[in-house]
Image: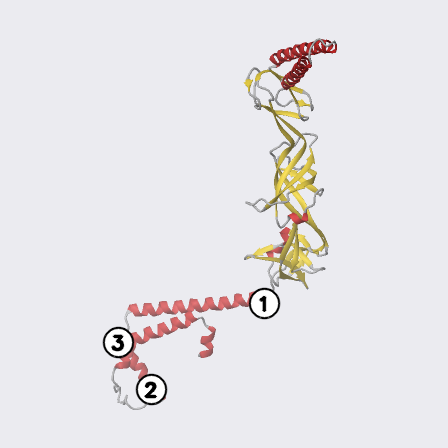
Amino acid sequence: MTRIQSRLHPETVFFAHLCVNLHVGVHGDRQAAPAQTHDGVDMGRKPSLATGRFGCTRQINSGPKPSGAAHLLLLLCALLVGSIFLQGCRDQKTAGETAGREAPEVAVSVVPIHPAPLRDILILPGQTEPHLDVRVASDAAGRVEALLFREGAAVAKGELLARIDVAARKAALDRAKAAYELAENVYDRRRKLFDRRIITQEELDYSIAERTRAEADLDQARVEYQDGFVHAPISGRVNLLHVDQGEFISRGDPLLDLVDIEQIEIIASVPESDVRYLRVGQSVQVRIDALPGKESLGRIDFIAFKADPATKTFRVKVVMDNTALEIRPGMIARLAFLRRVIPDALAVPLFAVVDRSGERLVFVVEDGFARARSAEIGVIEGDRVQIVTGLEPGDQLIVKGQRNVEEGTRVRIQ
């Protein structure tokens, strides 16, 4: 009985005991009845085998009969026990078939692992700025007589940009010239009179002072007259006009902005842990977000000697040519600084690294089975990542189907 029960489900044994208890509950009053004698047989004595079986049968038959509800309950219990028993046999058969059948192979693709050079590249954002950005201000006060360029126009260094109250300054210059000529003539006449000893040295000295004063006034008038002509300090383009023709301005008021964008400067903030890899003159790959697919080459022009106290980063300036004027100041750039080259790195495609519950894994093939390796990643270059620990040269790395395998999965290399 013990061996039979061990093969049955616990539910089967439970319901069998339940049915026995129900049977005993229905007929339990007969077991409690005192011994009786039937047909002269003493029920108190131990009967023979035949008599005992016959007597028992008569005892059961002579007892009170169970009700219809009890019969129905017993029938339901028997059906339930049978269904559970059959299901247990079916489950055992299915488990046996599954255990006897081998797990299917998973098709994978592999690549051999070999050491290869890998570049350690630092990519930082930066903002483009013009190589030269000059705000041209007025050296004189007065009315703007003429603005000779419009916004966007190209100008050359030294070219005339505007005239400010030139007519009035021309009149002042003419007066200064006349006063100087008069002082010069007076000095010449008095010099001759002094040589003839007609006038004293004091009168001659007075003439010399007047001539010197007139010469200084003439020089000042010339400067003020020239200040009325505004010339371009650099070659570039007019980016913004601050005044209109006919306006009155004061000395030092801005007139216009000139920018030189044939060279572009890109300013980036480099962390303190990376600035030690950079050198002035080092080449830098530059990509502009507004110009997708276009890469340019720049060079490091300046590295700050002092870090920004707020961000603890160092200001780095990269200069690049922009003769086509495609790059405009204010655009966002991506700078790729080469920190170092790892000559014998074990690099794998990024998609070959699988994340399982926060652990990075790579799968390799060994003797037809997939083996999981815990991977520590290092430098990332493009779509390749360095595996610091977890791989060895010559390993067969799974690069297709790696998400469909587990440790010990049988695989087939395509």
As measured in the structure, the alpha-carbon distance from the residue carrying label 3 to the one carrying label 1 is 55 Å
Q: Nearer the viewer, residue 236 or 234?
A: 234
Q: Are marks 3 and 1 in contact (CB under 8 Å)?
A: no
Q: Nearer the viewer, mark 2 or mark 1?
A: 1
Mark earlier in primary sequence (3, 1):
3
Q: Residue at x 34, y 90 (%)?
A: 48
Specify the label residue 52 is tagged with.
2
Earlier residue among tags 2 and 3: 2
**Quarter of the C terminus within the rendering:** bottom right
Answer with the quarter of the image where residue 138 lies: top right
Q: Earlier in the sequence, mark 2 or mark 1?
A: 2
* Secondary-structure class at tag 1: helix
Mark 2–mark 3 distance (CA, rounded to whole Å): 20 Å
User: Hey, what amino acid is under mark 2?
Assistant: Gly
Front disc: 3 or 1: 1
Mark 1, residue position: 100
**Residue 217 place in picture, x, y as percent:** 64, 16
The reply to whether residue 400 is in sight is: no
| Label 1 Cα crowd, 10 Å radius (few <14 / some 14-19 / many 20+) | few
Could you tell whether 131 is left or right of 74 in the image?
A: right
Residue lying farthest to the bottom in this orientation:
45
Q: Position of residue 116 (x, y in %)?
A: 73, 53
In this rendering, would 19 be left or right of 175?
Answer: left
Q: Quadrant of the N terminus?
A: bottom left
- Report crowding for label 2: few under 14, some 14 to 19, many 20 or more residues within 10 A (C-alpha): some
Disc 3, SS: loop
Q: Position of residue 284 (x, y in %)?
A: 69, 42
Q: Amino acid at mark 3?
A: Pro
Residue holding disc 3: 64
Under mark 1, the amino acid is Gly
Q: Position of residue 281 (x, y in %)?
A: 72, 42
